[in-house]
Image (cartoon, rainbow, N blue to C red):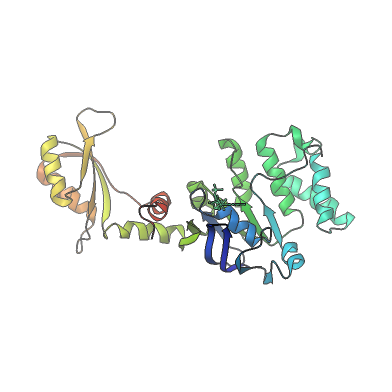
């Protein structure tokens, strides 16, 4: 539904996007992650036809965004960064205006504007001018304007950026309801957001795709990449030097420090290499029992998308 082939953009000496290839299938919700300056906005602008690439092609619903812009745009709802809105217009007037630009008939406009006002929770402010809206409501108007012509493809650049936590939750819920009916590509800095909403994640660094997969696939790969070992966290009580000695027998780099709350409890984090037919936690539990330590917590630490992101986009770790 969305596809890019060898998409490249150079701004003078800066290569913002470097030979990017991607595919988003119909009905998928894909999160687009990357640190500042990775090239996310530039990519989304090229995918939507807002910015011509230096080389490569982008298609929406099978239509090349440069050679068939009208067909491609009809299928697209694009929420650019910092939604441009007309501050002096009223909410419903603005949405009618956008619907007319999208070629909807008068009857369709009336029906669709009412529908998106309801779907986006804008009924209480429909008569307000855009200038008087909160940032969260302005963002909802931006989203409503991308949905008004029922586009199958949505490209959303940082849809929750700058919102307070309550507004973020509301906008996220709104976006959460869009999967299935729409194909969504959404950029974000917020890893938990992407972790919750996206079927699949693309990670961009230095203009190149460095990872693509489901959240589960990427986190599993990150866990495995740490020398195939499993990270285990344990909270225990024992003589600190002896605890260090026992845990470091399992992992020479085990970290041991005072646990939050004090009271003589220590916290240890260690990476246990793969053991034949034994769970890493069992090995730690056995070592603690043999050391005579009292254990109050023992758990496997799952790699988070955050860890994947840091590992893949860290300049020191970048390929
Ligand atoms: N119009 C432009 N002229 C020159 N350089 C640009 C232009 N737009 C973007 N760049 C450069 O291209 C690179 C990628 O920028 P881009 O805005 O696409 O990154 P991003 O991943 O969206 O970052 P952010 O998360 O900060 O929005 C950056 O080095 C940026 O400075």
Figure disc tally: 0
Relative to residue 106, is residue 293 depicted above or below? Answer: above
Q: Quadrant of residue 276?
A: bottom left
- 65 or 188, which is in the foreground? 65
* Left or right, 90 with reference to 144: right
Q: Quadrant of residue 84?
A: top right
Q: Quadrant of the C terminus?
A: bottom left
Q: Position of residue 69 (x, y in %)?
A: 74, 66
Relative to residue 226, is residue 124 depicted above or below? Answer: above
Can residue 285 be seen at all in this image of the molecule? yes
Can residue 179 be seen at all in this image of the molecule? no
- 177 or 13, which is in the foreground? 13
Q: Position of residue 283 (x, y in %)?
A: 18, 53
Which residue does the image show at 19% across and 49% down from the upper left? 284
Relative to residue 64, is residue 76 depicted above or below? Answer: above
Q: Position of residue 144 (x, y in %)?
A: 72, 48
- 269 or 121, which is in the foreground? 269
Which residue does the image show at 15% across and 50% down from the upper left? 286
- 39 or 132, which is in the foreground? 39
Which residue does the image show at 82% across and 55% down from the upper left? 101
């Amino acid at each position: 539904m969305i596809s890019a082939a060898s998409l490249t953009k150079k701004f003078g000496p800066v290569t913002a996007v470097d030979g990017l290839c991607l595919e988003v299938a119909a009905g998928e919700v894909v999160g687009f992650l990357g640190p500042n300056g990775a090239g996310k906005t530039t990519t989304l602008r090229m995918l939507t036809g807002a910015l011509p690439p230096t080389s490569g092609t982008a298609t929406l619903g099978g239509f090349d965004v440069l050679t068939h812009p009208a067909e491609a745009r009809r299928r697209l709802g694009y929420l650019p960064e910092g939604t441009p809105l007309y501050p002096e217009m009223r909410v419903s007037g603005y949405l009618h205006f956008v619907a007319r630009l999208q070629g909807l008939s008068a009857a369709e406009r009336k029906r669709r504007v009412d529908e998106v006002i309801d779907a986006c929770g804008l009924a209480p402010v429909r008569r307000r001018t855009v200038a008087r809206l909160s940032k969260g409501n302005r963002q909802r108007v931006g989203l409503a304007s991308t949905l008004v012509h029922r586009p199958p493809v949505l490209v959303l650049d940082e849809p929750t950026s700058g919102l307070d936590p309550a507004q973020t939750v509301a906008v996220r819920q709104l976006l959460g309801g869009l999967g299935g009916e729409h194909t969504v590509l959404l950029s974000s800095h917020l890893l938990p957001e992407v972790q919750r909403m996206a079927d699949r994640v693309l990670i961009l660094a230095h203009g190149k795709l460095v990872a693509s997969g489901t959240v589960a696939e990427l986190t599993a790969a990150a866990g495995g990449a740490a020398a195939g070992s499993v990270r285990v966290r344990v909270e225990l009580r024992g003589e600190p030097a002896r605890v260090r000695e026992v845990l470091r027998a399992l992992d020479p780099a085990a970290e041991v420090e005072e646990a939050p709350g004090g009271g003589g409890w220590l916290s240890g984090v260690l990476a246990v290499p793969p053991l034949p037919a034994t769970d890493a936690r069992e090995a730690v539990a056995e070592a603690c029992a043999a050391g005579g330590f009292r254990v109050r917590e023992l758990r496997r630490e799952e790699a988070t998308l955050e860890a994947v992101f840091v590992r893949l986009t860290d300049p020191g770790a970048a390929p």
